[in-house]
């Protein structure tokens, strides 16, 4: 008799490879003729833009650039502050043996630091150190047998699992663009420093679309025509729609933002404004929970069946958890007493992460950089303070085997300089952890009837239970059934048999 089977397709998002690489972007900057020579650098900062990511056979290629802003002290009689802006391009090829163009790439690329070296009064050497954390995934549709039709004689061992199957992926472009107004009393001269910070991230699903919303916080430090240093803070909404078919509110959405290009263009002096345009790529992976009843093993007491198995890696317990914490600190900084703060920059970093008792325990630090006009030298100076913090995120089921990716962002901050030189800082942080577990399962993808026994002769075998035995293994070995063994031996709980126990095994030969 032909064996009729029920089959199911499953889209599995399998990790093919992971890598953490350092990228060095290097270049020289020539000071334009209209600007004075450089005496020393005051501050250097930058933003990474990713132009293109390409998966090739056996490797990954990343092309990008670093938008660099240099604030320097001019080598002239007045020792004024001046600014430079340049782009340092880079290309990085990461070897990954199993990579192929059909796969998906997730990346987290961050600027670690920028080294700036003065070669002479007109030339500066720049080296940007970038950290790239990449993961390569294969989205594979796997067909497996989930059931047998019209064959009561075939014995089946099932196991039930809840897994996270990839429902779909998508990508879209979004723009954060606006005209930023500066004070009417300021006649803009040049940009000294630019910072971007993406906050207030939200994800909503409806009508086969993912709506990704966030706010781009823009901070620009600029120089006026009368050599004053000032800053402007602006918030630009970002929104993107990604098409994902059959999505629902129960699905888990992982959304990632990546800056591709930046345009900052000061308008005419009369307008007292700066035009900002940031091109972003928003990518999304959507997962749905599936209850799978997987056949682990099967046999027939009356026929010889051959079944082929394969191992697949599935994802479980996919979830995203966000917690918030507030950092309050009073710092005494003598250099700031009677000085004017031009700009403060706060960079959060997680330094240590542990998992204990269903909690993700994060230790971190905030590096707070103050840019100020010194009351003693009347020049722009920098002072950096480090403030430690910790946050514990409740996460039932998390373990050392969990794949964990934790990100931190600043949602709000209030930094106030007091007359006595103390600084009160209140900083709100949002800590988001994406976690999952990978599990290998065996599935049966083919069954073949090798031989039919035309005559079934009933017999009994006496068997003594050995270590490691289960009723399933015993029944399969002697081509019996668990139901028959339980009935003949009067077993109350089929999951409990003892080593040395005598069993009568009904069998077919």
Image (cartoon, rainbow, N blue to C red):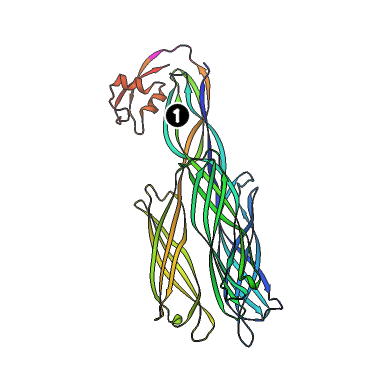
Q: Residue at x 36, y 34 (%)?
A: 468
Identify the residue position indicated by label 1 in the image. Answer: 297
Residue farthest along the bottom direction in this orientation: 77
Q: Residue at x 66, y 71 (%)?
A: 268
Quadrant in the picture for the C terminus? top left
Foreground of the two, 124 or 182 = 182
Percent position of residue 204, x then y: 49, 47
Instruction: Please state the total of marks drawn on the protein image.
Output: 1
Answer yes or no: is residue 133 visible.
no
Quarter occupied by residue 418: bottom left
Percent position of residue 135, x then y: 55, 51
The boundaries of the magenta stretch are: 453-458
- 397 to 79, vertically: above or below: above
Foreground of the two, 505 or 163 = 163
- 236 to 314, vertically: above or below: below
* Residue 129 highlighted magenta (yes or no): no
Quarter occupied by residue 300: top left
Residue farthest along the right direction in this orientation: 33
* Residue 457 highlighted magenta (yes or no): yes
Residue farthest along the top direction in this orientation: 455
- 347 to 479, vertically: above or below: below
Percent position of residue 365, x then y: 43, 66
Other residues around mark 1 within 10 Å, as few (<14) / some (14–19) / many (≥20): some
Q: Residue at x 65, y 75 (%)?
A: 124
Foreground of the two, 288 or 299 = 288
Percent position of residue 230, x then y: 55, 75
- For mark 1, give the secondary structure: strand
């Amino acid at each position: 008799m032909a064996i009729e089977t029920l089959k199911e397709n499953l889209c599995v998002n399998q990790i093919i490879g992971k890598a953490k690489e350092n990228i060095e972007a290097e270049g020289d900057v020539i000071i334009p003729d209209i600007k004075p020579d450089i005496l020393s650098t005051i501050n250097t900062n930058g933003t990474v833009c990713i132009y293109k990511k390409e998966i090739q056979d056996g490797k990954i290629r990343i092309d990008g650039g670093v938008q660099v802003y240099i604030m320097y002290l001019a080598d002239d009689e007045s020792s004024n502050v001046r600014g430079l802006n340049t782009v340092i391009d880079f290309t990085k090829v990461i070897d990954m043996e199993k990579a192929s163009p059909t796969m998906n790439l997730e990346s987290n690329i961050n600027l670690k630091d920028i080294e700036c070296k003065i070669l002479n009064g007109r030339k500066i050497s720049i080296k940007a150190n970038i950290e790239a954390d990449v993961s390569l995934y294969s989205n594979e549709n796997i067909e497996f047998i989930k059931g047998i039709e019209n064959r009561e004689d075939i014995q089946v061992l099932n196991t039930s699992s809840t897994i996270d199957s990839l429902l779909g992926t998508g990508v879209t472009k979004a723009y954060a663009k606006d005209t930023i107004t500066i004070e009417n009393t300021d006649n803009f001269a040049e940009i000294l420093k630019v910072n971007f910070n993406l906050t207030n991230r939200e994800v909503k699903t409806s009508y086969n679309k993912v709506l990704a919303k966030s706010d781009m916080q823009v901070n620009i430090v600029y120089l006026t025509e009368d050599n004053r240093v000032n800053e402007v803070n602006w918030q630009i909404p970002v929104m993107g729609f990604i098409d994902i078919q059959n999505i629902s509110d129960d699905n888990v959405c992982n959304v990632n933002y990546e800056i591709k290009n930046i345009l900052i263009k000061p308008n005419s002096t009369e307008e007292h404004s700066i035009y900002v345009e940031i091109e972003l790529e928003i990518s999304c992976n959507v997962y749905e929970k599936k209850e799978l009843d997987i056949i682990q093993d099967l046999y027939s007491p009356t026929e010889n069946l051959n079944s082929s198995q394969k191992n697949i890696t599935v994802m479980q317990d996919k979830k995203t958890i966000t917690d918030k914490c507030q950092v309050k600190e009073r710092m005494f900084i003598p250099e700031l007493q009677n000085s004017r703060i031009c700009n403060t920059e706060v960079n959060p970093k997680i330094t240590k992460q542990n998992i204990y008792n269903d909690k993700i325990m994060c230790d971190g630090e905030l590096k707070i950089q103050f840019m100020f006009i010194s009351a003693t030298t009347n020049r722009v100076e920098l002072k950096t303070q480090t403030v430690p913090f910790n946050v514990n995120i409740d996460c039932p089921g998390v373990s050392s085997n969990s794949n964990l990716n934790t990100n931190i962002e600043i949602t709000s901050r209030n930094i106030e300089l007091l007359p006595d030189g103390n600084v009160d800082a209140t900083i709100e942080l949002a800590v988001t952890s994406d976690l999952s577990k990978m599990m290998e399962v065996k599935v049966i993808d083919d069954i073949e009837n090798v031989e039919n026994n035309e005559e079934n002769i009933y017999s009994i075998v006496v068997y003594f239970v050995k270590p490691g035995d289960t009723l399933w293994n015993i029944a399969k070995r002697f081509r019996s059934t668990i139901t028959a063994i339980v009935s003949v031996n009067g077993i109350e709980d089929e999951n409990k048999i003892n080593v040395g126990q005598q069993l009568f095994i009904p069998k077919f030969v």
